[in-house]
Image (cartoon, rainbow, N blue to C red):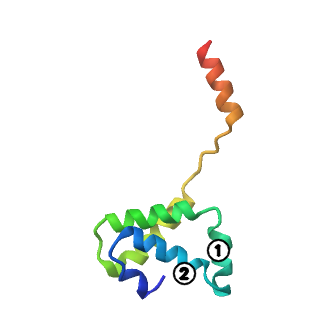
Amino acid sequence: MGHWLVSWKSTYSAVIEIHCQIIKGRKFESVREYLDGRWSTLEDAVLTAWSSGIHTDTRPYEIASLFLAALSAPQSATNPLIDGLEEDLSST
């Protein structure tokens, strides 16, 4: 990330700044594309790291670690049709 990240005092400010840095200019084009469907995962990582009370110098690394861990965690795919069928079967 960058030194600008450790200077932010609040979680909300950090999330806004990360978002602003990513949406600016062509140099972040590939980052924008990658985070397109993963923004909430990155935001959760920022919020968790900020509320953990870790030293400001280690926050960028903690955010990256939490973000990558969340991406590599097994995801359960929910299918509304199967959910509806299971609800119908359980109510009979």
Kind of residue indicated by mark 1: Arg
- Mark 2 vs mark 1: give the one in front: 2
Residue at mark 1 = 32
Quarter of the picture holding the C terminus: top right
| 91 versus 12 height, above or below | above
Tell me the residue at 61%/77% (across/down): 23
Frontmost residue, 77 versus 81: 81
Secondary structure under the numbered disc 2 in the rendered image: helix
- Classed neighbour count for the residue bearing mark 1: other residues with Cα under 10 Å, few (<14), some (14–19), many (≥20): some
Tell me the residue at 50%/76% (across/down): 18
Residue at mark 2 = 21
| 8 versus 68 height, above or below | below
| 40 versus 90 height, above or below | below
Tell me the residue at 64%/31% (across/down): 83
Q: Quadrant of residue 28?
A: bottom right
Distance from disc 2 to disc 1, alpha carbons, whole Å, reads 10 Å
Instruction: Name the side, left or right, on which 35 lies relative to 54.
Output: right
